[in-house]
Image (cartoon, rainbow, N blue to C red):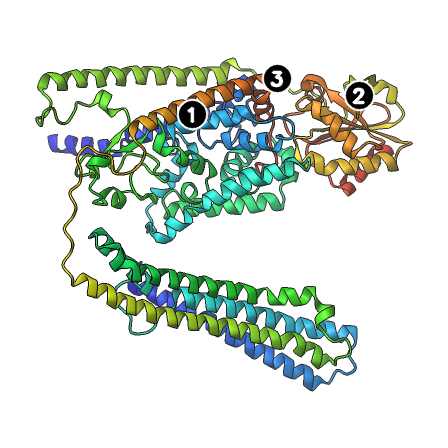
């Protein structure tokens, strides 16, 4: 009986997650603390999204509690013709210098997913000189998709977060699947097209790759890992190599599943698995001198008194850290799921009377004193398009609205409402591209009108109001010219 | 995967690619013969279009297959007789060199091996470049069709004007790649013999390693200074970014669903 219990105990203890896994789970839960978003299909829109999470976590995921640093970087670069993105640069620099790639090993939710996928029992592909060469590809992705393409297109007035749009699997997994699988966002389903097919196929390929190949995405594709890796040698937290003690035996290299040359280099994710393999104790955690007794004092091991002192210090630090972490997590869960109340979506659906508003109109000289009120447009169909200069699909479809505005000038008024965000750049954009347009441009202060018309955070959004002021159609997807004409003609026939 | 399995897989892949080349070449020849026997003179736009659709695809496939086979043979082909050890002679050479370097033989002694590595790599790169250039030929031809095809030529002449150079380019690429492979294998084997002869020499005594002295990398105080400066710079940038609206930009994008980022639109 005693043997049975001890066997069960041993089995249970072997199934217990390691400390690193617990920290990874904690970080993933904290980064996605808005759990009610998965049920309601709405993303968190509160002030905490000013802050970037350190790891890769799409901010369009319903559970996301903060902004993604990579997405923020690309959007900041895409708007760099308006202002230099010091804030995002500063955040990423701070994360890099403080943590380096320790973030990849401990804090990144997508890294956790890759570790769990790799645990599936299949033959594994071991690292080699080929994988070492492939690990440089993420620098190409960083340079081309994360920096160069957004910058080039920024100066062509077209925002393009190229990595997010064409590659990022976290966006497809957390964002698309997270929003669509709840059933609360079925109006987004018509937007599934070739881009989603490509991204979904890429997600599947990465998932399969991660099963056979340890941390496939981290090693080959992740530009965030590439950035943090540059700071690995000077980061405050992480694995450090004591070079005088290192004998180049290669044991750390053999134990490690990443493409390192030595522990603590740019490929090291500071998981700590190599520490036990080093025969000379040259690999240690930074800051370990504070909590571990010195190995040698005048050539002899530390005394019992010194060892007790350090043991007590470790215990105090452990308890304090656990209490603080649990408090932060509980506080976050309570705040996101009970205290934070998203604004209720008003019932401005097709068939309802359209909320009227007086919007301040824009032209190329800036804000006009004139206002546009919907009541004044009775007898004509009004097409209200919510757009922004920061939104690529909005820029792509705006020429269609311009064409409709000129073709149906007698029967239709097209109102292009720009968000308050980057509203100061809208006038210059309109002057450059739509100086002679028949569209009326307006500014949505505080995005209040967008919210009144039932906007849930997706741009562009088009609301077509018929001649009697009744909402005929509300579309939350980008429109082709033919689709727009069909919708307008349907409202005209109404 | 064991070495033997890898060997077999790579040989099979190489054979498949060569077979594909042969099939496409045969199909091309058959198509050309059919067209000439069909006697479609004078040509009409419809007959030209029909002929192109039969011939061009074979030529395109042949050139691609020749390029792929060439690349495959350059990178992965294993000559018969080499069963044991690592598959690529140049990898065995690199391993021997690394072993010699770890034993700290002098750089002058290892110089021929370094030169050998550079030679092999540049030959391989040239083979890859030739293959890629040849693969571009069909595209080049289609883009400059009017200039390259004589307008008064017969249909046969039109077809041959496209097919013949394509065949020649493909065959040349394949031949060049095979020649590069053979030459580099021969020179790698010679270099390996040289490396083995060096290993027969007595290994030099390992120099004394200074204890407590950092052998490479930044000194500790430099790391602390760099880290402090970067943290200060980061904090300043964050503060400046808050005041110039950067933080507001992050918030405004993060609270909206980025449909293109999640693959919708």
The quadrant of the rendering that contains the C terminus of chain B is top right
Kindly indicate whether the residue at mark 2 contacts the one at mark 3 (C-beta within 8 angstroms).
no
N-terminal of the two: label 3 or label 2?
Answer: 3
Cα separation, mark 3 vs mark 2, equals 26 Å
Please name the residue shown 77% across and 33% down the image.
A432
Would residue B88 be visible to someone looking at this image? Answer: no
Q: Is residue B57 above or below residue A190?
A: below
Specify whether A58 is left or right of A263.
right
Asked which secondary structure carries label 3, the reply is: loop
Q: Position of residue A70 (x, y in %)?
A: 51, 33
Query: Which residue is farthest front?
Result: B108
The residue under label 1 is: B230
Asked which secondary structure carries label 1, the reply is: helix
Foreground: disc 3 or disc 2:
2
Front residue (pair B9, B175)? B175
Quarter-wise, where is residue A119 in the image?
Answer: top left
């Amino acid at each position: 009986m005693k043997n049975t219990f001890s066997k069960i105990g041993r089995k249970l203890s072997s199934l217990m997650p390691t400390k690193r896994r617990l920290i990874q789970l904690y970080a993933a839960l904290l980064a996605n603390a808005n759990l009610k978003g998965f049920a309601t299909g709405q993303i968190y829109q509160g002030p905490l999204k000013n802050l970037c999470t350190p790891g890769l976590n799409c901010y369009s995921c319903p559970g996301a509690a903060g902004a993604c640093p990579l997405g923020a970087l690309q959007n900041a670069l895409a708007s760099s013709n308006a202002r230099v993105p010091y804030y995002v640069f500063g955040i990423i620099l701070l994360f890099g210098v403080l943590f380096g790639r320790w973030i990849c090993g401990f804090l990144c939710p997508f890294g956790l997913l890759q570790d769990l996928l790799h645990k599936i029992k299949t033959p594994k592909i071991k690292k080699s000189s080929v994988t070492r060469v492939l690990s440089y590809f993420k620098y190409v992705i960083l340079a081309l998709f994360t920096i160069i393409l957004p910058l080039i297109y920024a100066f062509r007035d077209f925002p393009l977060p190229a990595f997010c749009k064409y590659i990022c699997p976290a966006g497809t997994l957390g964002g698309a699947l997270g929003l669509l699988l709840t059933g609360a966002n079925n109006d987004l389903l018509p937007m599934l097209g070739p881009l989603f097919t490509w991204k979904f196929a890429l997600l599947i390929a990465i998932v399969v790759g991660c099963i056979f190949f340890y941390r496939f995405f981290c090693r080959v594709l992740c530009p965030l890992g590439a950035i943090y890796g540059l700071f690995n040698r000077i980061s405050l937290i992480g694995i450090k190599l004591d070079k005088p003690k290192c004998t180049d035996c290669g044991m750390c290299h053999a134990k490690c599943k990443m493409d390192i040359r030595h522990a603590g280099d740019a490929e090291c994710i500071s998981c700590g698995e190599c520490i036990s393999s080093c025969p000379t104790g040259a690999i240690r955690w930074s800051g370990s001198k504070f909590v571990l007794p010195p190995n040698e004092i005048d050539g002899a091991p530390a005394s019992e008194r010194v060892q007790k002192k350090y043991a007590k210090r470790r215990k105090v630090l452990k308890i304090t850290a656990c209490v603080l972490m649990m408090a932060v997590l509980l506080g976050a869960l309570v705040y996101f799921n009970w205290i934070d109340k998203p604004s209720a979506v008003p019932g401005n659906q097709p068939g309802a009377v359209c909320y009227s508003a007086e919007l301040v109109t824009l032209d190329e000289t800036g804000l006009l004193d004139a206002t546009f009120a919907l009541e004044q447009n009775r007898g004509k169909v009004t097409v209200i398009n919510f757009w922004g200069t920061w939104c690529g699909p909005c820029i792509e479809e705006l020429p269609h609205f311009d064409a409709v505005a000129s073709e149906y000038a007698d029967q239709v008024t097209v109102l292009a409402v720009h968000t308050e965000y980057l509203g100061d750049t809208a006038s210059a954009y309109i002057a450059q591209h739509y100086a002679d347009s028949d569209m009326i441009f307006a500014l949505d202060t505080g995005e209040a009108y967008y919210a009144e018309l039932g906007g849930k955070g997706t741009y562009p959004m088009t609301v077509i109001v018929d001649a009697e002021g009744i909402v005929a159609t509300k579309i939350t997807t980008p429109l082709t010219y033919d689709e727009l004409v069909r919708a307008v003609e349907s409202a005209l026939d109404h | 995967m064991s070495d033997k399995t890898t060997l077999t897989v790579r040989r099979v892949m190489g054979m498949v690619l060569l077979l594909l080349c042969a099939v496409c070449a045969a199909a091309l020849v058959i198509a050309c013969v059919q067209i000439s026997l069909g006697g479609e003179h004078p040509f009409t736009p419809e007959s030209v279009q029909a002929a192109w659709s039969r011939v061009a695809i074979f030529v395109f496939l042949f050139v691609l297959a020749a390029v792929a086979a060439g690349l495959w043979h350059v990178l992965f082909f294993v000559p018969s007789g080499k069963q044991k050890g690592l598959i690529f002679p140049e990898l065995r050479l690199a391993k021997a060199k690394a072993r010699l370097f770890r034993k700290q033989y002098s750089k002058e002694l290892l110089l021929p091996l370094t030169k050998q590595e550079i030679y092999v790599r540049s030959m391989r790169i040239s083979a890859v470049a030739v293959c890629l250039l040849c693969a571009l030929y069909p595209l080049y031809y289609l883009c400059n069709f009017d200039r390259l095809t004589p307008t008064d030529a017969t249909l046969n002449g039109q077809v041959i004007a496209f097919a013949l150079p394509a065949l020649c380019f493909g065959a040349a690429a394949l031949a060049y790649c095979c020649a590069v492979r053979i030459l580099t294998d021969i020179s790698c084997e010679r270099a390996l013999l040289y490396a083995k002869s060096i290993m027969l020499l007595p290994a030099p005594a390992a120099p004394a390693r200074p204890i407590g002295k950092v052998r490479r990398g930044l000194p500790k105080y430099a790391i602390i200074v760099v880290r402090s400066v970067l943290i200060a710079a980061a904090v300043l940038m964050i503060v400046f970014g808050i005041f110039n609206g950067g933080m507001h930009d992050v918030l405004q994008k993060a609270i909206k669903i980025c449909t293109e980022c999640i693959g919708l639109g």
